Amino acid sequence: KYLILDVRTAGENSVISISDKNSMHIEIKDLFKKENLDKLPTDLPIIAICHSGTRGLMAALGLKQIGFKNVQVLKGGFIALAQDNTVKNAPIR
């Protein structure tokens, strides 16, 4: 169990989004509003993701500072994910 927290803009999310049932999109500019913080689980690991990793890191650090214990960052964001998604890594069917 986990939560993937996409902190990119709505425009970025409209181009490529995460369809995992354990994902949530909250723009970083809105993340620290009380109504959005209340949506985040306190009992599950949170994996912050953005385009390149910078906003994900900012989100994770901020969440840790206000008491979220288990927050990680997808290092390199969607860029790293796309670069690692090659024919060599494709699952064999």
Image (cartoon, rainbow, N blue to C red):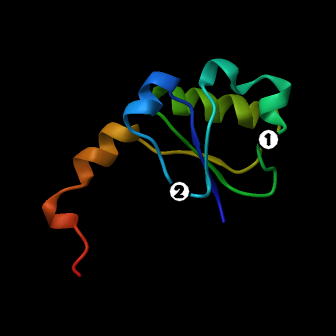
Give the amino acid type for the residue marked by disc 1 in the picture. Answer: Lys
User: Mark 1 and mark 2: span between their CA atoms?
Assistant: 17 Å
Judged left or right of residue 13, residue 61 is right
Q: Quadrant of residue 57?
A: top right
Give SS at disc 1.
loop
Q: Residue at 76% across / 48% down in the picture?
A: 69
* Residue 71 in view here: yes
Q: Residue at 73% across / 57% down in the picture?
A: 44
- Residue underneath mark 2: 20
- Residue underneath mark 1: 39
Please tell me which residue lies in front, 53 or 15: 15
Measuring from the top left, give residue 2's x and y in whole percent: 64, 59
Q: Which quadrant would the C terminus be assigned to in this image?
A: bottom left
Give the amino acid type for the residue marked by disc 2 in the picture. Answer: Asp
Q: Residue at 72% across / 34% down in the picture?
A: 63
Q: Which quadrant would the N terminus be assigned to in this image?
A: bottom right
Q: Residue furthest front?
A: 14
Q: Residue furthest bottom?
A: 93
Please tell me which residue lies in front, 13 or 67: 13
Q: Residues within 10 Å of mark 2 (few under 14, many from 20)?
A: few
Please tell me which residue lies in front, 83 or 30: 30
* Residue 9 in view here: no
Judged left or right of residue 57, residue 14 is left
